Image: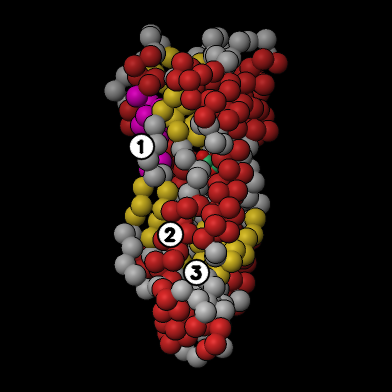
Amino acid sequence: MLKKITTVAGVVLLSALTACGSGGGGGTASSGSGTITMGFAQVGAESGWRTANTKSIQDEAKAAGIELKFSDAQQKQENQIKAIRSYIQQKVSVIAFSPVVETGWDTVLLEAKRANIPVILTDRSIDSDDTSLYKTFLGSDFVEEGRRAGDWLVANASGPTNVVELQGTTGAAPAIDRKKGFEEKIASKPDIKVVASQTGDFTRSGGKQVMEAFLKSQPKIDVVYAHNDDMGLGAIEAIKAAGKVPGKDIKIITVDAVKDGMQALANGEINFIVECNPLLGKQLMELAKKVVAGEEVPNRVVTEEGTFTQEQAKAALPQRQY
Ligand code: GYE
């Protein structure tokens, strides 16, 4: 074992030894080979954003020489909990996950803590009073994203405006926060009313289905606010099927700015997109290395992002990575 360890870089050697020492004799998957092992419990494959996020994590783990154990929870919390428990059992060096919903994590994260396995939250955060359950949270400011969507509508709406909202997964941080930030901003203009709001689970089919129902039940819809591009793209299909013109008869605001969304924006079918960057892999691997080495990391790392109008989407599309 020692012979093997002497061949690896000093910083990793240090972390492997630390892991051995603090692991109470059990060690971690990093002891022995010196390689950092990350157990990653992904939400699912519900959207274009998620696909880009998964690819970024897989590519950057490889580039960083981190051995990745990856699982897809199909948007179910119970599956994520199972995956985390199995990573604890496998004694990985670090667990990272994107919690499908905000609550209900304390028990399993306490198990990880007791096993001395550091946890990094990425993309979505949890709602818990015990901040010692994770080392850091890397991701966007979803309330701010909602505010940016609301700001655009306040600046662009004229006269009474009926909004229907396609919410993300019920209980998920981005669904809760994007709703909150948007409401905060439109409150300044009483003419703007959210007349219906329902979850489309962040999927294209969910957005289409809910929009079909809204089109039947609501006599006047001026604007769709979709918590992600995919639901907005589903809504476009429903609007067209109802004989209306998306982007004109009914304006659409979404969040994410993935390729398909940006294309629809450039084509005039979406009116405004708030960016949410899925390329978190590189920063995640950097944080993982530090955490495993026992180094201090900030408890919150916010990703930088902007917004896009139709003209800006046309200009940005050729260089878009996702
Ligand atoms: O906006 C949506 C995805 O958590 C930020 O999840 C992420 C969201 C993203 O399904 O498209």
Question: Could you tell me how far apart the alpha carbons at marks 2 and 3 are, in whole angstroms?
Answer: 12 Å
* Circle nearer the N terminus (2, 3): 3
| Placement of the C terminus among the 4 image quadrants | top right
Residue corresponding to mark 2: 286
Question: Magenta span has 145?
Answer: yes
Residue corresponding to mark 3: 94
Of tags 3 and 1, the one toward the viewer is 3
Residue found at x 60% / y 38%: 48
**Element at badge 2?**
helix
Q: Amino acid at mark 2?
A: Glu
Of tags 2 and 3, the one toward the viewer is 2
- Tag 2 near tag 3, CB within 8 Å: no
The percent position of residue 270, horizontal first and vertical second, equals 53, 19
Question: Could you tell me how far apart the alpha carbons at marks 1 and 2 are, in whole angstroms?
Answer: 25 Å
Q: How many marks?
A: 3
Q: Report the magenta residues as a range.
A: 141-151
- Tag 3 near tag 1, CB within 8 Å: no
Question: Magenta span has 309?
Answer: no
Q: Which residue of the protein is positioned furthest toward the front in this rendering? A: 7
The percent position of residue 212, horizontal first and vertical second, equals 66, 23
Residue 3, above or below 317: below
Q: Amino acid at mark 3?
A: Val
Q: Is the CB–ligand 1 distance for label 2 below 8 Å?
A: no
Please say whether residue 161 is visible from this viewpoint: yes
In the drawing, does residue 5 fall left or right of residue 161? right
Mark number displayed over residue 46: none
Q: Residues within 10 Å of mark 3 (few under 14, many from 20)?
A: many
The percent position of residue 272, horizontal first and vertical second, equals 46, 22
Q: Amino acid at mark 1?
A: Glu
